[in-house]
Amino acid sequence: MPLPAEIPLRTGRMKLPLGIVFWLEDGTSQAETVVFLHGSWQDSSQWLPLMRHLSPGYHCLAPDLLGFGESRREGKTPYSVATQVECLHSLLSALRVQRCRLVAHSLGAWVAGRYALTYPDQVQSLTVLAPEGVSDRDLQHRWRRDRWLVAPWSPLPLVLPWLGQAAWVKALRQRRQCLRQTPAACQMLFQRRPAALRGELLNQELGYLKPPTLVLESVTADPTARRLGQIWLHQVPSAQHRQLPAAESPLGVEVAPCAEALEPWLRSQPLKPAGTAMYAAVNHNGSVTPGQARPPAF
């Protein structure tokens, strides 16, 4: 299927109760909506290649999560999975998107899983890649080093400049520099009380997920990503699994095979009938105009 070069990519920006949210948009508003949620150290641009593949048949919407990319929180709203869920719900409500399919990577999968549990009637299907949001005995200490690198109480950043030029020291410095470029992710994952973070894990609740779920995995996924995917597959009822060729890309997989895996999966999950949906059209300059009625797609 040729890419829709005649349909330009659009952008939008909207002030919501929790902050200002920016998003990328492709495809036509008359088609089913697929919402893409980016990973921990990415933003909405992570999905551009895949959106270009899917936009001939779908209305593609990729927001920057609150605090990521060009989205900004209001005041000192604490970053959490629950906050991201409510911000996403506010955005979809403002755009009159009543039904959608979620495709999510890493931290975005955590948000997507919580969203599907909170608003099960809105989510038609769920696709996750390298999904976060779960843990077990083997994974519970995997963020210890990163917490020490960015936590405000940690002495490690103070001593790093004095530890010399050994390879392991340089690696720590580079890792800290990388982490500090995404402060919202650091606050969500490493700078909260461990009990608060554990309270948002999905382990025990994944069994209640209603939307059909597909777990994608790179054939060269590291042991941590593989274990995270296994937990999702074990906990989510009737979850399906698909491996994809690896690539040096923000998603870690080749885009074309990913699109080829997604298209039949999305088509195989019929859209549940709903009343006439309202969609707020987005102009090329990013402004939002009043919604117009459109029938649900099947």
Image (cartoon, rainbow, N blue to C red):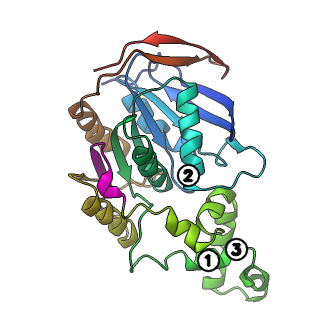
Q: 275 or 105: nearer the eye?
A: 275
Q: Residue at x 67, y 29 (%)?
A: 14
Spot occupied by residue 101 in the image (x, y as percentages of width and height):
38, 35
> Which mark sits nearer the N-terminus, 3 or 1?
3
Residue type at mark 2: give it: Ala
List x then y, in percent, for residue 174. 65, 71
Using the rendered image of the protein, determine whether residue 245 is visible from the camera's viewpoint: no
In this view, the mark in front (2 or 1): 2
**Residue drawn where x is 21% and y is 33% of the image:** 268
Q: Quadrant of the C terminus?
A: top left
Secondary structure of the residue carrying numbered label 2:
helix
Q: Residues within 10 Å of mark 3 (few under 14, many from 20)?
A: some
Residue at the spot of label 2 = 82
Q: Report the amino acid beneath label 3.
A: Ala
Pointer 1 local density, CA inside 10 Å: few below 14, some 14–19, many at least 20 = few
Q: Is residue 145 above or below residue 70?
A: below
Q: Regarding mark 1 in the picture, which secondary structure is present there?
A: helix
Q: Of discs 3 and 1, which sits in the foreground?
A: 3
For the residues marked 2 and 1, what is the alpha-carbon distance in whole angstroms?
Answer: 32 Å
